[in-house]
Image (cartoon, rainbow, N blue to C red):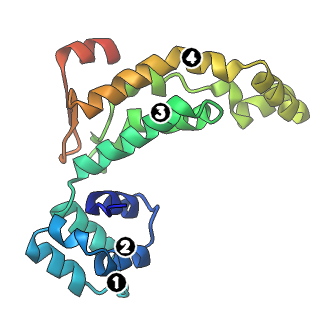
Amino acid sequence: MKNDIKITSFKFLNKEMSIEEFEKSIYYQTEIESQLNEKTFQELLEFNYKSENSESSLRKIIIEKIIGKGEFEKWKLIKLLSKFIIDVKNAPIYLDKMYDLYLGQHQENGNRLYEYRFLAGLGLNYFYWLEEGYLRINYGDNWKDEYEKLIKNKEIENEHKKLKPTAELILESLKNNQIQIDNSGTYNITKELRQILEK
C-alpha cells in the first residue's frame, strides 16, 4: 500500500500514530520523498524526534509545510461523519462530538474558531435521553436497565435513520468543496446549503 504523507500526517495530528511511527515512515517509506519538496523532506530527516518538545514542534512543521489546519479539520469532519453514517450503535457518541464542533473552540478573546453551524441538525440532536447522568436522575439504580430497554427497542436506530440524510449531505458537501474549511478557523458554504443546514 502506498504510504501517503498526508494520511500519515493526519494520523499523527489526530493521535492515531506515535511520533516513533511517524519517524519510521519518513526513514523507511521511500515514496514519501517524492510527495514532499526537497527542503521539507530534508527537515523531516534531520528532525530530532526524541527532543523534549518534539511532538509540538513536529505538529507545527506538518501544519505549516505539509497540510494546513483547515485541511486537517476537514479530514476530521469527514472521518466523524463517515463513522456516524455506518456505526449506528455508537451514534450518540458521534453526535456528542458534533455538538462540540457545532459550538466551536472558545478563544481567550471571546471569539470561537471552527464553529461549524452547518452541524446544527446533528449536533443539536444529541440523544440526551441516553446519557448516563439523565438516566441516573430519572431511573436511579435502574438506569442501566432503562438504557438496555432503549437499545432493545431500537430507539437509536430510529433516530439515526432520521439524521443520516443530513450527515450524508454534509459529508458529500465537504468532499465536493461546497463546504470549505479555512486555515483561519472559519468556513465557506454555499448559500443553498446554508439555508438548508443552518436555518
> Given the image, on which type of amino acid does mark 2 rest?
Phe
Q: Which residue is mark 1?
A: 49
Residue 148 location (% of width, % of height):
82, 29
Q: Residue at x 30, y 41 (%)?
A: 114
Question: How crowded is the residue under tag 2: few (<14 C-alpha within 10 Å), some, or many (20+)?
Answer: some
The amino acid marked with disc number 3 is: Tyr
Question: Which of the two discs, 4 and 3, labels the residue nearer the N terminus?
Answer: 3
Query: Type of residue at label 1?
Result: Tyr
Q: CA distance from mark 2 to mark 4?
A: 38 Å
Q: Earlier in the sequence, mark 3 or mark 2?
A: 2
Cβ atoms under marks 4 and 3 closer than 8 Å: no
Q: Secondary structure at mark 3?
A: helix
Query: Disc 4 and disc 3: Cα gap in Å?
Result: 18 Å
Q: Would residue 152 be found to the left or right of residue 8 on screen?
A: right
Is label 2 in contact with label 1 (beta carbons under 8 Å)? Answer: yes
- Does dot 4 land on a helix, a strand or a loop? helix
Task: Mark 3 or mark 1: name the one nearer the start of the chain.
Answer: 1
Disc assigned to residue 99:
3
**Residue 199 percent coordinates (x, y):** 33, 12
Which residue position is annotated with label 4? 161
Viewer-closest of 27 and 136: 27
- Marks 4 and 1, the one that precedes in the sequence: 1
Residue at the location (50% across, 29% down)?
A: 85
Residue 63 visible in the shown view = yes
Count of number-bearing discs = 4
Image coords of residue 110 (percent x, y): 29, 42
Q: To which residue does mark 2 refer?
A: 22
Please give left or right for residue 184 compared with residue 74 in the image.
left
